[in-house]
Image (cartoon, rainbow, N blue to C red):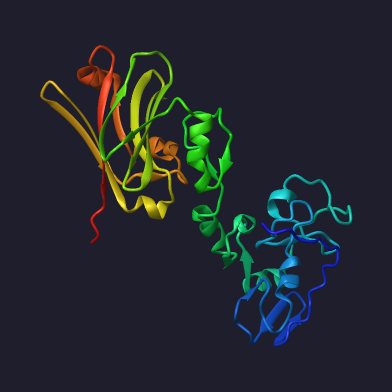
Amino acid sequence: MTNKTTSKQRELPIVTGARYLGTGITSTNTSPLTAGGGDDCNSADLISLFECPVCFDYVLPPILQCSSGHLVCVSCRAKLACCPTCRGPLANIRNLAMEKVACNVRFPCKYSGCGCPAAVLYTEKPQHEEICEYRPYPCPCPGPACKWQGSLDHIMQHLKISHQSITTLQGEDIVFLATDINLPGAVDWVMMQSCFGHHFMLVLEKREKYDGHPQFFAVVQIIGSRKEAQNFVYCLEINSNRRRLTWEAMPHSIQQGFMSAIDNSDCLVFDTSIADLFADNGNLAINVTISPREKL
């Protein structure tokens, strides 16, 4: 988010073509206003009226004010005992005028400070920010230990420096060998695969999704965006003793994370008894094939 200056002045600026009546607003100008543009007023000044004085994020509908008319965002409001501007009591008074103005303003993406140029209506803001390619990416490795976040361009450098134990194999068709699959408790196996100019990460996780019932979950995620993930298909195959178990799907983006796939069982899932049928001396070989997705 770009740096902003705060102001205690909360009076609504005059906008050409608009008439303000009490708590309502009528306007003949229906074009959404964006920061840094507009001929009728300084849109950046208008947008600054929606800045929360606590976190400097935007106060979006439903907009509540204190008895003196000061605004604070919903997230901060839940943590406050009094108005941060006047120290007066917080009231449940709807500011309908500001809500109607908000409907015609395009707000900068929260990742504008990371380079995102988008300005969207407040109703579109959560959806855009969820898939915004400029949002910081988390470390794609399993486990809560690594708290790193950064741009997509820096992820591979982070993995090479902070996760040197991860093996990287070249090629679209490789074999991933998970050793000691009978280890007790929650265990993760991770491997990188490089092909078609992209990097993919295979995660095999053993855990008890249901108490007393350990299972294996295998999923491939691309070190890239959801849009890039749509260009590929991955196939996991386990075979041994005339048995074959396969799973084919589109890779997950690290924007989503592999945990969402596991939580939704949107991956290769098998229990320990199945694993024992395919394992060789406690080791499990998984064939991993990455293919470009055929365009319809």
Relative to residue 277, is residue 228 depicted above or below? below
Judge whether 240 appears above or below 91 on screen: above
* Residue at x 52%, y 53% (from the top left corner): 130
Relative height, residue 282 to residue 50 (above, below): above
Residue situated in front as seen by the camera: 126 or 285: 285
Is residue 247 or residue 13 the one in the foreground?
247
The reply, left or right, for residue 145 in relation to residue 45 is left
Question: What x and y, as percent, mark residue 219?
Answer: 34, 36
Please name the residue shown 54% across and 63% down the image: 124
**Residue furthest out toward the left:** 242
Position of 76 with respect to 126 (left or right) is right
Q: Which quadrant holds the N terminus?
A: bottom right
Q: Residue at x 43, y 40 (%)?
A: 260
User: Percent x, y for residue 250?
Assistant: 31, 47
The quadrant where residue 94 appears: bottom right
Residue 148, image x and y in percent?
58, 37
Image spot of residue 101 (x, y percent)? 68, 73
Q: Quadrant of residue 277?
A: top left
Say left or right for 279 vs 197. left
